[in-house]
Image (cartoon, rainbow, N blue to C red):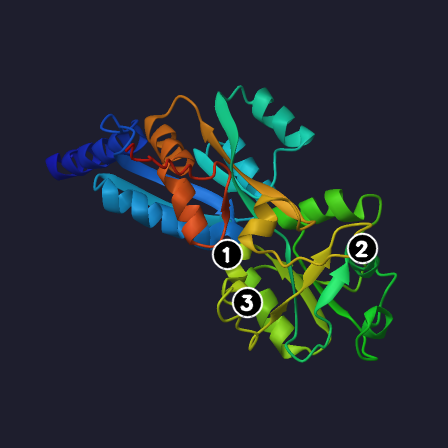
Amino acid sequence: MPRIERAIIGILLSVIVINCAPNKEETTTAGKLNVICDESIAPLLNVQIKEFMRIWKGAELTNDPDLTRRAVERFVNKETRFIVMSRTLNADELAAINEADLSYVHKPIAYDAMCFIVNPKNPVSKLKTEQLREILSGRIKNWEQVGGKNQPIQLFVMSRNDGQRDFLKDSLLRADDFPSDAYPCSTATQMKELVLKFDGALGYTGMAHVRDGLNPNVRDTSAYKVLALAPEGDSTYYLPMQEHVYKHRYPLVNVVYYLYLKSDKLPLGFAAFLSKEGQKIFQRNGAVPFEPPVWVVNFKQD
């Protein structure tokens, strides 16, 4: 074999070995980590990652939004070491992780809410939980049935295997399913665009995607309107504001979890950040921290 060819092959083998070898330089605050998260909470995670890398210059984190079930599959297949999801693991996912013999940590880090949005022209501003269930199951098909105009309801839902869709199915619909004519959306951005386009639209997303519509000072309703919901059997309506979500007055509150490989250093470091410093970042960016900040007041003695 010519000397040049042997040299090229040697270089290629060296590259392969380097790429496949574990990162010996990784610490809890340095190294590379690809985080996969639910699309509904991607804006929140982007802020967390940016702040983590600002503090720890040796860390290189990326955010890869995906459907919840697919994110868990990628975790099981060892394509990622860290995921953030808008619901807990179900029985099938737990079985798959245990069968793969993965040592993992799965803990809650924040509260989110299912925020239902309608077109700004829609006069309906609130719904009872019972009415919402009837709409999502397809039994109520016209806005006139819930105090609105004589107009068909155009329901938009997230694609199958999405965490929010699973949460609604389990917590609200239970034995029912979404109607066959509900239009599936792949992202929250697409859903908001369709809600603005169709006067009779009803969609949903997480708190991070509707911050302008929940601003307590000036609520922006130019692109969508966030509905207030009344808990089942109650006559008091609540918007998905942070206080109502934290106190569980708002009826559709879901928990955000992280899942990471226990034995790896950088996933451990990022998890610790989300559970501590990251709690204030959740609060400042429209979500609700799972561990609310504690204020200590010292009184001066006379």
Residue behind mark 1: 208
Q: In this rendering, is residue 96 above or below 233?
A: above
Q: Nearer the viewer, residue 250 or 41?
A: 250
Is the residue marked by circle 2 packed among few (<14), some (14-19), or many (20+) residues within 10 Å?
many
**Element carrying mark 1:** helix
Q: Residue at x 33, y 43 (%)?
A: 61
Q: Amino acid at mark 1?
A: Ala
Q: Quadrant of residue 200?
A: bottom right
Report which residue position mark 3 lands on: 213
- Residue topped by disc 2: 133
Looking at marks 3 and 1 on the same chain, the residue that comes earlier in the sequence is marked by 1
| Side of 16 where 94 appears, left or right | right
Closer to viewer: mark 3 or mark 2 = 3
Q: Is residue 215 visible?
A: yes
Above/below status of 110 relative to 186: above
Q: Quadrant of the N terminus?
A: top left
